[in-house]
Image: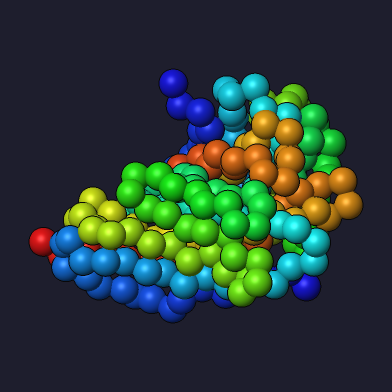
Amino acid sequence: DTAVSQTPKYLVTQMGNDKSIKCEQNLGHDTMYWYKQDSKKFLKIMFSYNNKELIINETVPNRFSPKSPDKAHLNLHINSLELGDSAVYFCASSLAGGLSDTQYFGPGTRLTVL
Amino acid sequence: GDSVTQMEGPVTLSEEAFLTINCTYTATGYPSLFWYVQYPGEGLQLLLKATKADDKGSNKGFEATYRKETTSFHLEKGSVQVSDSAVYFCALAVSSGSARQLTFGSGTQLTVLP
């Protein structure tokens, strides 16, 4: 019944490693997003995909690469992890990315880079 | 650019107290406005929204009115409960080319004591 799911929930890794976070939604939505929440709870959009096409790509290091194999999945791959990448990453989806559309968030992935 | 300014937290109240969390925004055009809530260890979920001036969003006893003249969307609840303890985010949705993205305020931590 989970609407937006993410795996893993926790990720602890060393600097310099490469890791991926997976996201799936079963709501039939067309638009998916990745957000980063820092230690002060500030949330910032990273990427947005609509029907597998990238439509928002905020100023994010190119070590971060989103991949959408189909419109129900949006994965986030991170190369050469740095200490500053430690944060909680949230996936979200919305029906069509409209101005008043509600976004549904996953439970988050807490990434800790040592 | 577009931005949301939220009342700084944390806010601590006794059960049954009146709650106000202030939110003001700066935006070009006519944004939609949202309040999202994040319970401990969970992702964000929509609390309420308003899509045009003078609209009032309401849910679970919470209310907020879209005030274009004061560019505000303050969150209120007449009698808070312990279960309302969470982080509350004000957000606006703006157009960015073909995309609609949410811009969040910094979040306000609410703790309700029994």
Residue under the point 79% across and 35% down: A50
Quadrant of the snapshot with the N terminus of chain B: bottom right
Q: Which residue appears at 83% of the width and 55% of the height?
A: B96
Question: Residue B105 occupies which quadrant of the picture?
Answer: bottom right
Relative placement, left or right, of A59 versus B84 is right
Compared with A64, B4 (above or below) is below
If the image is split into quadrants, where does the C terminus of chain B sit? bottom left
Q: Position of residue A98 (x, y in %)?
A: 74, 40
* Whether residue B43 can be seen here: no
- On the image, the x and y values in percent for residue B43 come to 46, 47
B23 vs B17, left or right, is right
Decide if residue A93 is in sight here: yes
- Residue at image location 71% in from the left, 57% down from the top: B31
- Looking at the image, residue B75 sits to the left or right of residue A35; the answer is left
Q: Position of residue A64 (x, y in %)?
A: 73, 53
Way the structure is coloured: rainbow
The residue at 16%/62% (across/down) is: B15
Residue B97 % position (x, y) = 88, 52
